[in-house]
Image (cartoon, rainbow, N blue to C red):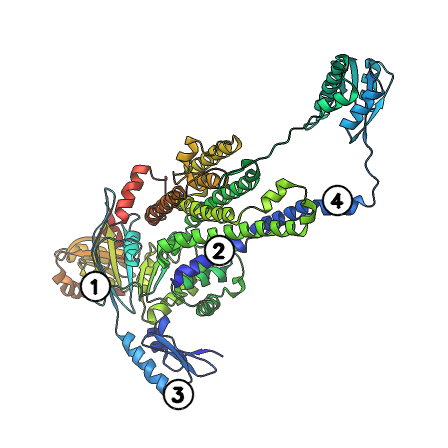
Amino acid sequence: MKKTISNLLSEEYYGMITQRMVCERTSLGIEFPFFGQVIQKPFPLILSMIYSFYYVLGVFADMKLEVKDLYKNFGDKQVLQGVDFSVESGTALGLLGRNGAGKTTAIRIIMGVFGGEGEVLLDGKSINRREINFGYLPEERGLYPKKKISEQLTYFGMLRGMSKKNAKESVLSWLDRLEMTQYADARLDTLSKGNQQKIQLACALVTDPDIIILDEPFSGLDPVNAMLLKGVVAEVIKKGRILLFSSHMMNYVEEFCEKIAIMRDGKVVLEGKIKDIKRSTDRKKLVIASPEAPKLASAIGERLADYIACKEVQGDHVAVCLRAEGHKVKFISAMAALGIDFDGVQVFEPTLQDIFVKYTEV
Amino acid sequence: MKRFWSIFQFESMNYIKNKVFLGITLFLIVVIGIVLSFPRISEFFASDTTTEEKAVIALGGVTDAGDLAYFQHAMPDKTVEMVEKSADELKQDVDKGVYESAVFILEDHSYQYIVKNIGMYDTTQTVVNEVMKTRYQALALSQLGANEEEIAAFLSAAVSGEVVQTHGGKDQLNTFFYTYILMIALYMLILLYGQFVAMSVATEKSSRAMELLITSANPKHFMFGKILGAGCAGLMQFILIFGSAYGFYQLNAGYYADQPMIQSIFNMPLSILLYALMFLVLGFFLYAFLYGALGSMVSRIEQMNTAVMPVTFLFVFAFMAVVFSMSGGAVDSTFMKVLSYIPFTSPMAMFVRIAMGNVTALGIVFSVVFLMATALLVGYLAAGIYRMGVLMYGQPPKIKEMVKMLKESKQ
C-alpha cells in the first residue's frame, strides 16, 4: 500500500509539504525529492526523514502573497486602478466587491492569465508561476460537460504539472473525500448542480495547490453539501495554504476569513482584519438587552438625557447613541443605578454586510 | 512541453475515441472495400445466374437483311429483330414493352427512333444514327459504281497515329482522376478539421471550461495542441482511408487490368501523393489557425457558423476556382498562376498545377515558402487573438477591435 510521508510526520507538517514535495514510500523503499529530482532507491528511513525534514523546513516558512498597485485597462475602460492587498499562508482573504468591481480581473492577473501594471509578489519576490501551483474555482463554473469526471479531473491535474499516475490517485482521493466516488465514470452533465459544484472544487484542489482561489464556492449547495465543503475549505486553510475567497455570502466570509479587501471601481477601498475593521467603527452605539425595555428606555430618556443623542426600542432591546465614546462607562453605571432590570450591554458592531454596503454603495 | 503533450494527447484522443469519428472512418473503409471488390463479388454471384437476356430492338420500314446485319454488328449487346409492322404498331409494341425500342426506316437517310424511356447514358440512338449514315454512304458509293470491297475499304479506312510526348509534359486525361480525388480529400479534410478546431474552441468557451483551462496552462499551448491534435486525427483518417483503398485495389488488381482510369488512380506517382500530403498539412495549419482564432471570438456555439463564414467562403471559393480550371483543362491559365501563389488558395491551386500542369521547381519552392511564412504569421497572430478572445464574452469583436486586442496582447 502506498503511503505518503505525512504518515510519518504530524498532520500540520503534512499541510506544509507541497504537491511536488510529497514523498512516497514504495515497496522498494522510499522515493523522495532531492533538489528537484526524485530519487527512487531503497534509502534507509532515517536518511529519508532528514531530507524530508530539510524540505519541510524549506516550505514551513510562512508564505505571503502581495498584490501591489495593479492597474489594468481593456481598451478605454480602466478596470483596475491601483489594487493592493496581501494574504499570508494559513489564512484566507475575503476579496469582496460588487459585480464589476474588478475582482475577477485582479484574480486573473494574479494567476498570470494576462499582464497588467503593478506587481504580484510572493515572499517579497516577483511570483514565479512555474513553481507555484494555483487552484481556481471560477465563479462562472465550467468543465467539459460531456466528459467523464475522473478523466477530465486527471487532465486538469496533468495540465498543472502532475504525472498521470499522481493525478489519477489524487482525483480518486478527492472524489472520495467529497463523497463523489460513485460518479467517477459519469459524465459531468448528468450530475446535479450541487454535485457539479463539488467536482469543480475537486478540480481546484486536485494538485494540492499552494494558492487557492475560490470564487463563490458555496452558491447552489444544499446545507449538507455546504457543510461538507466548509469542512474542506477549513482543512485547506489549516494546512497552511493561501486562500483567496470571493463571495457575496457574508456569513461564509466571516466564518473563513480573518482579513477582507473590499474593491470598488477597480480600487481596494478597505483592507484589514474583520475584527479590527469592526472595532475601528464608531463605538458610540450601545445595545441594552432588558426584559423591561420600554420602561428602561423612557427612564434613560428622562434621567440620562445628558449622555445620549438618540434612543430606540427594538423588542427586548434598547439602542442608544452616546454623545461621546468616553461616556460609555459612566452611562452604564448611571443606568445600573436606575434600578431597572437589564440582561446585558453590548457595543453595537456593524455586520460585514453593513460594512460591505457602506463601502460599495454608490 | 509536458503540458503541451498532455493537451495534444487529450485533443487527439477526443477524435480517436469519438464514436462518430470511428464510425465514419470504418464506414468509408467498408464502402471503399465493397466498391473496389465489386468485380470479384459480382463474379462470385454471376457464376450461378444465367446471363441476362438481351434487350430486343425492332427494325422495320424500308429495310432488308443487309441492314439487319449492319445493326446487329453495331449493337452486339442487343438483339435486333426485323419486323413487318407499321410505325404505329411498333409504337404500341414499344409502349407495351414488347421491344425496348424500335428503328423505323422511312427513307435512305431518314428514320424514326421509337423509344419509351431514354436513359441518361443511352447511346442507342447515336449508334442508330451512325449505322444509318454508314448505310447511306455505302448506298451512295454503290450507286457511283464502287464494288463491295471498295466500299468496305472506304468505310473502314483506318488512320494510324502515335503520340510523342516531350519529357516533363503532363497528360491531363491520365492525371485528372487522381488529382481530382486528392483535391477533394484536401478540401474535405481542411474544411472539416478546420471547423472541428473552431467548434472545439467554441465549445470550451461556451461551457466555460476555458476559464479553468486558461489558468492551468499557456493559451498558446492550447491552441497549438488543439490544432495539432485535430490535424493528426485528420491525417490518420486520410491515411487509413487511402491506405485501405490501395490495399483493396491490390487485392483485386487483376480485375482492373483493362481499366486505365482506375489504374491511373492507384498508380499515381509517389511524388504527387507526397505533394498532396505537404499541401494538406500546410493548408490545414493555415486554415486551422484562422478557424481557431475565430472560434475563440464567439461566446456561444450558435454564433460560430456566422463567425467562421468568411474563412469557409474563402476556402470554398478557392476550391471552386481550382475545380473549374481543372475541368476546363486550363490549369496553367493566368488566373490559376495567380491563385497558386496566394497562400489561401495555393494549397489546392499549386497542387493541381504540379499534378496536371507545368510549373517550374522555383515556382513550387516560392509558393511553398510563401505558404509556410503566411501560416507562421497567421499562427502567431491567431495565438494573440486566441489569448484575448477566449476570455471575452458577448458580441464577437469587430476587426478594428481585434487589431487593438492584438496590440494589447503583445504588451
Image side of residue B32 versus residue A279, left or right: right
- Spatial separation of the CA atoms under disc 3 and disc 2: 44 Å
N-terminal-most mark, 4 or 2: 2
Q: Are marks 2 and 1 on the same chain?
A: no
**For mark 4, what is the residue?**
B42
**For mark 2, what is the residue?**
B12
**For mark 1, what is the residue?**
A276
Q: Secondary structure at mark 3?
A: loop
Q: Amino acid at mark 4?
A: Ser
Q: Quadrant of the N terminus of chain B?
A: bottom left
Q: Are marks 4 and 2 on the same chain?
A: yes
Instruction: Give the percent coordinates (x, y) of residue A318.
Output: 25, 57
From the image, state whether disc 3 or disc 4 is nearer to you. 4
**Tag 2 subunit:** B
**For mark 3, what is the residue?**
A44
The residue that appears at 59% across and 48% down in the rendered structure is: B24
Of residues B275 and B23, the one drawn nearer to the viewer in this rendering: B275
Of residues B336 and A339, the one drawn nearer to the viewer in this rendering: B336
From the image, state whether disc 3 or disc 2 is nearer to you. 2
From the image, state whether disc 4 or disc 2 is nearer to you. 4
From the image, state whether disc 2 or disc 1 is nearer to you. 2
Residue A329, image quadrant: bottom left
- Spatial separation of the CA atoms under disc 3 and disc 4: 75 Å
Q: Is residue B325 visible?
A: yes
Instruction: Give the percent coordinates (x, y) of residue A323.
Output: 13, 56
Image side of residue B195 versus residue A97, left or right: right
Packing grade of label 1 (10 A; few <14, some 14-19, many >=20) is few
Q: Are marks 4 and 2 in contact (CB under 8 Å)?
A: no
Residue B47, image quadrant: top right
Q: Amino acid at mark 2?
A: Ser
